Amino acid sequence: NFEILFYKVFHNKYLFNYIIKQIQITEWIEYEDTDQINLDNRKRFKDIVSLKWMIKNKQYQLLKCKLYANELIDID
């Protein structure tokens, strides 16, 4: 059952693109206070290029993905 559902979602272009878009706009930083979350402090993963920022915010998995994908990383 799950495999059939997964196959249907994966092969539905609209749903697949929607899921990918949501992953791209999701900010994976955990806030102590939910009032800190707003649209002005959100960044797309592809727009984050600062090594200093990734280390400061403990985004090690993002750094690993960027290195693996050979993406731009600014060493500031």
Image (cartoon, grey):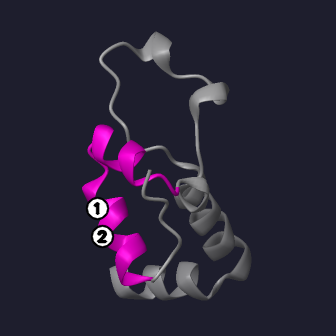
Name above or below for residue 2 compared with residue 31.
below
Q: How far from the left and from the top, in percent, is residue 56?
A: 30, 38
The amino acid pointed to by label 2 is: Lys
- Residue 62 within the magenta-colored segment of the rendering: yes
Q: How far from the left and from the top, in percent, is residue 12?
A: 66, 82
Mark sitting on residue 76: none
Can I make out residue 1 in this image? no
- Residue 56 within the magenta-colored segment of the rendering: yes
Q: Which residue is mark 1?
A: 61
Label 2, residues with CA under 10 Å away: few <14, some 14-19, many ≥20: few
Name which residue lies at 58% across and 29% down.
41
Kindly report the secondary structure that dominates the magenta region of the rendered protein. Answer: helix
Q: Nearer the viewer, residue 28 or 9?
A: 28
Q: Which portion, as a residue range, is magenta?
A: 49-69
Query: On the image, which quarter does residue 64 sit in?
Result: bottom left
- Contact check, label 2 and label 1, Cβ < 8 Å: yes
Q: Nearer the viewer, residue 64 or 11?
A: 64
Name above or below for residue 39 compared with residue 33.
below
Q: Which residue is mark 2?
A: 64
